[in-house]
């Protein structure tokens, strides 16, 4: 069962597995969306991406082309999440601010990572599995941990297996 709202923009050859929830988002051509993924309104996913199962991509997340997102990755879009206003009333869209997050071309985010809002994950960078990204990740950089810290740089314009300490 797939729940794909009529306002979703899908590129050519997008592969979507069962039990997804897509609404108000845009998905580029040749991208694969795994089982149990939710992508909210205003989120964008580029071409040739792989979004693995159990991942949550919320409003305000913008993923460029060629990005890998591992299983169970969670993006956050609110710096101060609350269920109610100061008066105790349920919050509405007017009671909070969506903070954007950007994942640049060919980045890779490992399984079970959490990406806080307002950060940019740089081109060709790698976020290790289980990491909590609390600040920007420079291009061509490998980060891991909680909070994610730089492990090493990747030599730009070379094969991915070639790294420097």
Image: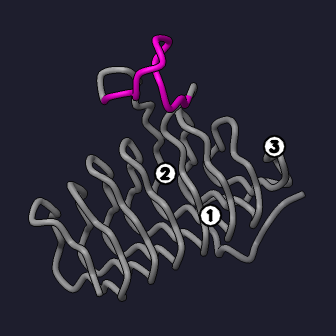
User: Which mark, residue 147?
Assistant: 3
Q: Residue 96 location in percent, x, y? A: 41, 24
Magenta segment boundaries in residue numbering = 81-92
**Quarter of the image holding residue 151?**
bottom right
Q: Nearer the viewer, residue 71 or 148?
A: 71
Q: CA distance from mark 2 to mark 3?
A: 18 Å
Label 1 neighbour load within 10 Å: few <14, some 14-19, many 20+: many
Please give the name of the residue rendered at 73% of the width and 77% of the height, measured from the top-left corner: 161
Q: Give the mark nearest the N terminus, 2 or 1.
A: 2
Q: In the image, is residue 119 part of the stretch drawn in magenta? A: no
Report which residue position mark 2 lands on.
103
**Quarter of the image holding residue 66?**
bottom left
User: Which mark, residue 109?
Assistant: 1
- What secondary structure characterizes most of the magenta part? loop
Q: Nearer the viewer, residue 156 or 143?
A: 143
Q: Are marks 3 and 1 in contact (CB under 8 Å)?
A: no
Q: Along the horizontal axis of the image, is 54 left or right of 59?
A: right
Q: Residue 73 location in percent, x, y? A: 60, 63
Please give the name of the residue rendered at 46% of the width and 77% of the height, measured from the top-left corner: 36
Label 3 neighbour load within 10 Å: few <14, some 14-19, many 20+: few
Please give the name of the residue rendered at 25% of the width and 81% of the height, measured from the top-left corner: 14
Q: Secondary structure at mark 2?
A: strand
Q: CA distance from mark 2 to mark 1?
A: 9 Å
Q: Are marks 2 and 1 in contact (CB under 8 Å)?
A: yes
């Amino acid at each position: 069962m797939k729940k794909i709202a009529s306002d979703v923009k899908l590129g050519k050859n997008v592969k979507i597995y069962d039990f997804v929830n897509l609404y108000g988002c845009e998905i580029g051509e040749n991208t694969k969306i795994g089982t149990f993924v939710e992508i909210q309104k205003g989120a964008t996913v580029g071409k040739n991406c792989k979004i693995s199962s159990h991942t949550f991509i919320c409003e305000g997340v913008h993923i460029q082309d060629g990005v890998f997102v591992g299983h169970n990755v969670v993006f956050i879009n609110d710096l101060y999440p609350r269920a109610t206003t100061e008066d105790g009333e349920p919050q509405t869209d007017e009671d909070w601010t969506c903070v954007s997050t950007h994942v640049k071309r060919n980045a890779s985010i490992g399984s079970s990572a959490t990406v806080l809002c307002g950060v940019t994950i740089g081109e060709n960078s790698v976020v290790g599995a289980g990491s909590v990204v609390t600040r920007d990740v420079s291009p061509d950089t490998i980060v891991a941990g909680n909070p994610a810290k730089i492990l090493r740089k990747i030599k730009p314009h070379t094969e991915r297996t070639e790294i420097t300490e």
